[in-house]
Amino acid sequence: MSLKTRIIPCLDVMGGRVVKGVNFVDLIDAGDPVEAAIAYDRAGADELCFLDITATHEGRDNIFHIVEKTAEHCFMPVTVGGGVRELEDIRKLLLCGADKVAINSAAVKDRDFISRAADKFGNQCIVVSVDARKVSSEKWEIFTHGGRKKTGIDALEFAIDMANRGAGELLVTSMDRDGTKSGFDLKLTRKISDAVSVPVIASGGVGTLEHLVEGVKQGGASAVLAASIFHFGTFSIAQAKQYMADNGIKMRIDN
Amino acid sequence: MSENIAIIDYGSGNLKSAQKALLRAGNELETPPNIIVSSNPEIILKADRIVLPGVGSFADCKQGLLLIDGIEEILIERVIKQAVPFFGICVGMQLMADFGEEKGKHKGLGWIKGSVRKIAPKDSKLKIPHMGWNELIFKQKHALLKNIDNGENGQHAYFVHSYHFEANEKQDIIATCDYAGDITAMIAKDNMVGVQFHPEKSQALGLKLLENFLRWQI
C-alpha cells in the first residue's frame, strides 16, 4: 500500500469552451468542459486540470462557472490555471470548487506573489507552472505567454525558489515538446524533481503510453499530465493506468 | 423530518466542494437532509450534525474559526455536552487536537488528545506534501467505514497535506495510510470523527463515507 502515481488529463478552455474539443463517443457536446470533466471523472482520472487560455478579460468569467458546475458533478481534485494574477483570483477559484490553482506569469513577474498566496491559502493549493525551453545542453529557461516570451530566468533556479516560497507542487512543461508527441523532456523533469522536495507533474509532449512511464521512471515525476492522447481517444485513462501498472508503477485502479 | 447539517463557514477553501459532496451523499438517504453552509451561531447551535471543513495552515484555520462570535462555546455546548455527530475534514480534523505545530505551536480545540506534526517519511526521498491517492488501512471498526474496502486492493482516498494528527491514545486512530511510515488518516472519539484526506474529492469512497456520517447513530 502506498501513494499512487497520478494521471491528469488537461483541458484547454477558451471563452468557456474546450479548445480542439474532446473526441469521446459518449459526449453530446464535445466542446463543453463540464461534460468532458464528467467523462474523465467516470473514466478514473486521478485529477483534472483546466487551463484557461482565454485571451480577453471579458471571457474569463466563464471559468468560474465551469469550475462550479464541475464541482457539482465531479468529486475529484481539480486544478485551474491561466490568468491567475491576484490573490482574489485564487480565492474566487477555490470558492467555486477548485482545489489548486496553477500560476505562471504572475509568479515570474513577482516571485513574492507565490509566498503571499501560499501563506494565505496554504501550500497545498498553489501549483507553479514552470514553462521551460532548452537553451543549451544542460540549461533551460523560463518562458511565459504560452512559450513565446523569453525571460532569461534559469528554470532550475526558478523551480527551487518557487518550492522554497511555498508552492506545493510544480507543473513542469517543456515548451519544446508541447504538442510534438515526442515525449517529455526527461532531463528537465529529472533535474527539477531531484532538486525540490515537492511533487512534480511532468507535462508536454506525450504521444505514447511509454512516454508516461518514462516521465515517472526517468523523469522522477509524481504525476503525468496529458491532453491530446486522451481527448482524441488514442488511449483511455484505464489503458494508460494499466500500462503504467504493468511497468511496475503503482497506480490507482479501483474505480 | 429532514435533519439539518451545518457546515461551518469561516471562509475555508473547500467549503463549496464539501457542500456539494454532502448534498450528493444526502440524496442516498430516505429523507435527504438540509445541508446548510453558515457562520450563524443560531444555526450551528440547532444543527443535528456539524461539519468543519478546513484547508490551509492550522493557525490560519483556528484564527478564521474564532472570528465567528462565540464559536468555541457553541461547539462545546453542541458537540461536547449534547454530543451531536461532528465531522472534521483535513485541517477541520486537525483542529480537534490539543496543539498544532505548523508555523509555531498553536492551541487546538483539545477534544482528542494529541498534536498535529509534520509528516516525516522514513524514506527522505519521498515528496512532501503527501499528495494524491492512497489506500486506507483500518485500525479500528467504525460506523463511518461501513461498505468501504480496506487495505491492499482497497479503495483509495485523496490526500494533500504536510502535517498529520499524532494521537496520544491508540484507540482514537481509526485508519492510517502508508507513506514510508504510518500517516493518520482518520481519528474518532465518541460522537467526533475526523479525516485527514478529502472525502469531497475522493470519488466513491468519499461519498460513501459522507453518507455513513449522515446516517451515523451514536
Image (tube, rainbow, N blue to C red):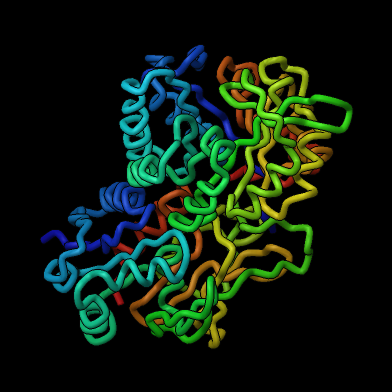
Which residue sits at x=50%, y=77%?
B100
Q: Is residue A3 visible?
A: yes
Q: Is residue A241 visible?
A: no
The spot of residue B200 in percent (x, y) is 41, 51
Looking at the rendered structure, the number of numbered marks drawn on it comes to 0
Q: Quadrant of residue A197?
A: bottom right
What is the residue that sits farthest to the right in this orientation? A137
The spot of residue A93 in percent (x, y) is 38, 41
State whether residue A50 is above or below residue B188: above
Which residue sits at x=41%, y=66%?
B60
Which residue sits at x=47%, y=22%?
A53
Q: Nearer the viewer, residue A46 or B144?
A: A46
The spot of residue B126 in percent (x, y) is 74, 58
Q: Quadrant of residue B117?
A: bottom right
Q: Nearer the viewer, residue B56 or B49?
A: B56
The spot of residue A217 in percent (x, y) is 82, 40
Indicate the quadrant containing the N terminus of chain A: top left, top right, bottom left or bottom right: bottom right
Q: Nearer the viewer, residue B32 or A48?
A: A48
Which residue sits at x=64%, y=16%?
A234
Indicate the quadrant containing the C terminus of chain A: top left, top right, bottom left or bottom right: top right
- A104 displayed left or right of A159: left
State whether residue B35 is above or below residue A59: below
